[in-house]
Image (cartoon, rainbow, N blue to C red):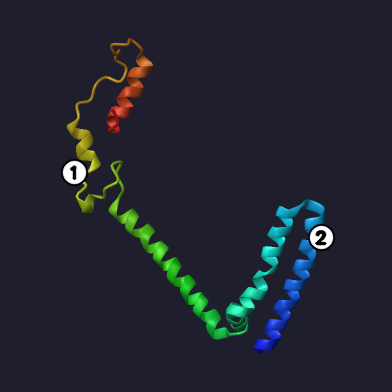
Amino acid sequence: MSDAAIFVISLGVTLVGLFASWGVYRRRGAASGLRGASLSLVPLAAAMTGVTEFFVDLAFSPVKWTGVAVAGLAALLYVTSGAMLARRSGTPEDGRGAGRGGGEPKAAKRAAKPKGAVGGATPSGDPELAEIEQILRNRGIS
């Protein structure tokens, strides 16, 4: 498509939008009318800066669509690899993986702690609170 045709189409769309914005200004007030006018000027600005030509070329070019597909595939592979790395390294509660200086594994941490009776009474005397406190201690939350 030629530059002149793109400019004429963009100018037409802008003029229609400005006319509609004038009607909005009369019905809803200055704020809505100005917002409509600003959005109406976007097609003309796009044509004058060359952005419209890029999108017209994109719409009708199989090579550019192939490039968009390759970029999407690259993004998908990147996100997938991040998920796979997170799963492989493990994520304990402290946020550090075992391969990155996370220290000893979870099982060793649990085995090192003395286990108390779950049903035992605490100084507060409530056995339900004692069970909750024991669960929190087992998970490393104090």
Which quadrant does the C terminus fall into? top left
Q: Along the horizontal axis of the image, is 131 left or right of 20?
A: left
Residue farthest toward the front in the current orientation of the protein: 30
Q: How many angstroms separate mark 1 from mark 2 (CA)?
A: 70 Å
The kind of residue tagged 2 is: Gly
For the point 37% across and 63% down, the residue is 81
Q: Along the horizontal axis of the image, is 74 left or right of 64?
A: left
Vertical order, 37 against 50 (above or below): above
Q: Along the horizontal axis of the image, is 100 left or right of 31?
A: left
Residue 110, quarter of the rendered image: top left
Assess disc 1: are there few (<14), some (14-19) or many (≥20) residues with their C-alpha within 10 Å of its C-alpha: few
Mark 1 or mark 2: whose residue is earlier in sequence: 2
- As helix, strand or loop, the secondary structure at mark 2 comes to helix
Does residue 55 appear in this view? no
What residue sits right under mark 2 in the picture?
Answer: 23
For the point 74% across and 54% down, the residue is 30
Assess disc 2: are there few (<14), some (14-19) or many (≥20) residues with their C-alpha within 10 Å of its C-alpha: some
For the point 20% across and 34% down, the residue is 111
**Which mark is on residue 104?**
1
For the point 30% across and 56% down, the residue is 88
Residue 138 on image: x %, y %: 28, 30
Residue 61 on image: x %, y %: 58, 85
- As helix, strand or loop, the secondary structure at mark 1 comes to loop
Residue 96 on image: x %, y %: 26, 48
The kind of residue tagged 1 is: Glu
